[in-house]
Amino acid sequence: VQGGEAGGITQQIGATYFEQKTLLSQTKRLNETEKFDITIPGMLVIDTPGHESFTNLRSRGSSLCDVAILVVDLMHGLEQQTIESLNMLRKRGTPFVVALNKVDRCYDWKVCPDAPIRDALKEQPEGTVQEFRSRSENAKLQLAEQGVNSNIYWEMGDDDWENSDFVPLVPTSAVSGEGVQDVLLLLCQMAQRKIWRQLMWHANLQCTVLEVKQIDGLGMTVDVLVVNGHLKEGDRAVFCTLGGPVVTEIRGLLTPPPSREMRVKSDYIHHKEVKGALGVKLIGNGLEKVMAGTPVLTIQDGDEEEDIKAEVMSDLTSVQDKLSVDKLGVMVHASTLGALEALLQFLREETDPPIPVSAIGIGAIHKKDVTRISIMNEKKKPEYATILAFDVDINAEARTHAAEMGVRIFTADIIYHLFDQFTRFMDNLQEQRRQDAAAVAVFPSIIRILPQHVFNQKDPIIVGIEVVEGILKIGTPLCIPQLGGLHIGKVTSIECNGKEQETARKGSSVACRIVNETNPTITYGRQFDSTHCLYSTLSRNSINALKENFKDKLENEDWRLVVKLKKVFNII
């Protein structure tokens, strides 16, 4: 599965079914010593993305599961998203095991493919075992800081197992397979010893939409997780969409072959009927707008259709808020609804400043999408004439049209890369705008000439000054409001202790060179002297340019000075 993911990172949610015979064969070596009788009929594994922006997909996964595997990187310890996942599991009271992954990254690790972890550790040199010990102690300490008691699972006493607060740690390597048997067997043990009551199958349909996806040859399909109950071909199913409930006949029930993931392209197996727990792909009409994370119900004989519709829609409000759009902003396209939600959440909450979104879409990008977002150019917001495309195809016609309409399309298979591309573009654009605005924007300042440091009285005037308020910057035009706004000249250089600098802030004393191209005869001591304070010459345009391009360069007291200077220069 990991090989099929962009960057080897889970980018979307998926489900894989292991039959009982698979569990028996996978844990065979370990079970020779453990002698545990596996009676569960199978195991459905939901794989959710780890990185921060995918909270929505993770919470969807954690709300569906009976028992969870929390993967912790042995090399890096608890990451932000690991802590987030941990809190989700505790909030829902889901029992879990911790897989201490990347054990093969310990120095001088000898690979023992797919071996039980204790067998693999016996083969390692003393130094490697010591490194493993110290790193796992670190992980235990970090978990303890989060209020989780944990121990390497074979070192847990009977009391620890009885104590529901204790979490077993299983060292694993996802690359070479050490410890994977241990995780599977441990999950089977937990299922049969601790949570067997809640695992009992019942006939009431409990089914949740994982993803909505366009598949070539099948059209729009819905990946669902059937936890309990039956689904049959021909059932009338009720789905939740933004436009209200949709009732459709199930035309097909497809599952991947056992031990293959739902999202990995393979020949699907067709079923007339399926029962939980199983990940199933549903085919039907009108599924384009089905919302991921919402329940699916079927209408049976004697059911009130309206009641079932109302029940399906009850979940929608929380999802709806996430998919709302702004009047101005970029367009976001993703391959699935879950990924779209994650993208929107990241753009609004994790980026600083937030990136507004004015249009959203699922699936490939066509010419009409380009036309739709190109209106941002007309609205004088060319930076938002941009499409962020995550894991989707772009029609050749759309590419050509985008070049003609001045629309940028950023594409990536990894959600992080998409943000990086857009942020880089915005940074460059901001820098370009700052350079363009530098001639217009004037930073606010009030300076006082130091009479004992006058080096040249005219053309150019070179004097020592003290910055009384604000920021003096090269290029700042200076005037004296007391003398009817007499224009003294522009600052062309600032020096402090023989070193040139771009700016001088409040309280600093520097030498500055002032050039007056329109009136080179202006002379210090004749038209003005050190009793007059010099002010930055502000105008409405210069203040607007400051607000738009240099907001982050000014502090609160600098903005207060701008307000004060507006009164001096009678700027409305």
Image (cartoon, helix red, strand yellow):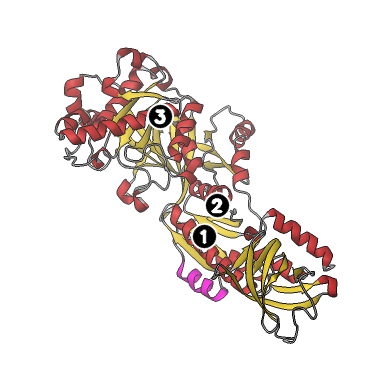
Q: Secondary structure at mark 1?
A: helix
User: Which residue range is magenta in the image?
Assistant: 395-405
Closer to viewer: mark 3 or mark 1: 3
Q: Which residue is mark 2?
A: 351
Spatial CA span between label 3 and label 1: 34 Å
Q: Which residue is mark 1?
A: 423
Q: Which residue is mark 3?
A: 143
Q: Are marks 1 and 2 in contact (CB under 8 Å)?
A: yes
Q: Camera-side residue: 302 or 289?
A: 289
Closer to viewer: mark 3 or mark 2: 3
- Tell me if 433 is positioned left or right of 543 in this view: left
Residue 5: x and y, percent? 35, 50
- Tell me if 304 is positioned left or right of 343 in this view: right
Spatial CA span between label 3 and label 2: 28 Å
Q: Camera-side residue: 273 or 48?
A: 48
Query: Residue at point 62% right, 34% down?
Result: 314
**Mark 3 Cα within 10 Å, few/some/many (few <14, many 20+)?**
many
